[in-house]
């Protein structure tokens, strides 16, 4: 019973944290492209989400260097 209360409290905390600190970005890609992304992420031991975040951060980093 206590574990269920803790799990419910943690879930509520996670939802509140997400509302306050995260922004979802919907992304539509062709199915074939998604499969390529998924395979690439897997080959690098990443989730699709993690790979997309890394790709965005790396691109922004490179763009900043070009702007200097």
Image (cartoon, grey):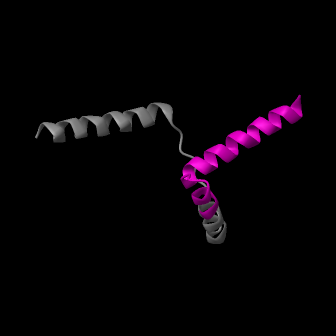
Single out the residue that lies furthest toward the bottom: 32
Q: Could you tell me if residue 28 is visible in this image?
A: no
Residue 60 in the image: above or below residue 31: above
Q: Is residue 33 above or below residue 9?
A: below
Residue 22: say if magenta.
Answer: no
Q: Residue furthest top?
A: 68
Residue at the spot 23% in from the left edge and 39% down from the top edge: 8
Tell me the quarter of the picture where residue 35 sits: bottom right
Q: Quadrant of the C terminus?
A: top right
Q: Position of residue 64 (x, y in %)?
A: 81, 33
Q: Is residue 66 left or right of residue 15?
A: right
> Is residue 4 or residue 22 the one in the foreground?
4
Classify residue 17 as left or right of residue 12: right
Residue 20 in sight from this viewpoint:
yes
Residue range corresponding to the magenta coloring: 39-68
Q: Quadrant of the N terminus?
A: top left
In this rendering, would 41 be left or right of 6?
right
Q: Residue at x 69, y 39 (%)?
A: 57
């Amino acid at each position: 019973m206590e574990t269920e209360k803790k799990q419910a409290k943690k879930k509520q905390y996670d939802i509140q944290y997400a509302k306050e600190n995260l922004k979802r970005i919907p992304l539509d890609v062709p199915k074939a492209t998604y499969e390529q992304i998924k395979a690439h992420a897997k080959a690098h031991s990443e989730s699709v989400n993690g790979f997309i975040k890394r790709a965005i951060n790396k691109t922004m980093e490179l763009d900043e260097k070009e702007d200097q």
